[in-house]
Amino acid sequence: MDLEQTWRWFHQHAELSFKEYETTKEIRRILSSINGVALLDLGLPTGVLAQIRGDQEGPVILLRADIDALPIREQTALGCPSLTEGTMHACGHDWHIVNLLQTAWLLSRKRKEIHGTILLLFQPAEESGGGAKRVVGTGLFTKYPVKRVFGLHIQPQLEAGTIAVCDGAISAAVDRFSITIHGTGCHGAHPEDGLDPIPAACQLAVSLENIVARRIKASDQAVVSVTHLEAGTSWNIIPDTAVLEGTNRTFKPEVRSLIKRCFEEKCQALEAEGYQVELDLKWGTPATDNDPVLTDLVRDEAHAEGLKVAELAGGEMSGEDFSFYQQLVPGSFFHVGVGGSYPLHSPHLEIDRNCLEQSARLLAQVAIRAGSGD
Ligand code: NI
């Protein structure tokens, strides 16, 4: 497989979450040309599931790549910009696709060494946060007795030739909230005639962000961000309602629950002042949870492959829906350095494709090792 040409095709055919139809077709076309790879039914309109059976008995190991792009207008100097207007592979999922395709090709030639079955999952819709949940909803994990799961993400801020790992959470739980404060509107000249929701919203915004400073242990990381505050229509009218929106990021389930309780307390305190408060706190993607033994396996194989292994001091505050799989089976998720001048989600992101071959070799070896020894 010509990795550069293959990557260019996927880069040019960037498709948004749950709309990865051409991407899905091309992945299927390439996989069906590899001897020893069998396509399976994923049970979703987009995304691909395939398997490689080893010559020896063993468990089922799942390798996952995400395949969707972002609603970003590409501004790279690459000679092969996205052909889909306003849509760009600005998170490197095009790279992830080619990486897993190449891994499939390598594994297909090593079936003698493989114990058990390796499942290849090309997952739709990581960016919108719904893809992994939908995959779990298909019953994949009951249909196939998956024992371990592995995934990776490119990291431009990490130099090529290095991977970054960490035990426990490598990415945060991503929750969102919306709070509507109902007061009583009145004339701006006579605030005493109503119940102004604006000072309540402002105090609440400050008080919510203080949860991290005053209620969370300093050694536990968390973020509470109010990102949207809206009220009123005119300069002389006190409005009826004010709305706050934002996001919480945490690594530990107990910190996540504590923040939820603090939100409830603070909303109840406003109700004691006469406001009616609607709190809508939605728990989204959970934090990833890297199994230390499987992460050690990744470390070992990376060293064997000549890669440097950087230990992350803590996880990142961004989310990764790979965590839905780790709620079901042990797994490890790691970052692959590709070097670069721009961060993920930048319209200028240009990813080094030279590390693809080595990264695919690493993933193939990780899958083989994870299946042996049982
Ligand atoms: Ni991504």
Image: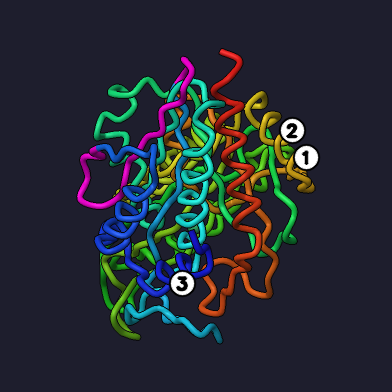
* 306 vs 270, nearest the viewer: 306
Any magenta on residue 52? yes
Identify the magenta region: 41-59
Q: Give the residue at mark 1.
A: 303
Picture coordinates of residue 117 (x, y %)?
43, 26
Is residue 272 in view from this perspective? no
Q: Give the residue at mark 2.
A: 300
First reached walking from the N terminus: tag 3 or tag 2: 3
* 251 vs 63, nearest the viewer: 63
Q: Marks 3 and 2, how far apart in space?
A: 31 Å
Q: Check whether the beta carbons of the residues at disc 3 and disc 1 lie within 8 A of each other.
A: no
Q: Marks 3 and 1, how far apart in space?
A: 29 Å
Quadrant of the frame with the C terminus: top right
Would you say 249 lies left or right of 212 here?
A: left
Is residue 286 in view from this perspective? yes
Any magenta on residue 322? no
First reached walking from the N terminus: tag 3 or tag 1: 3
Name which residue type carries label 2: Asp
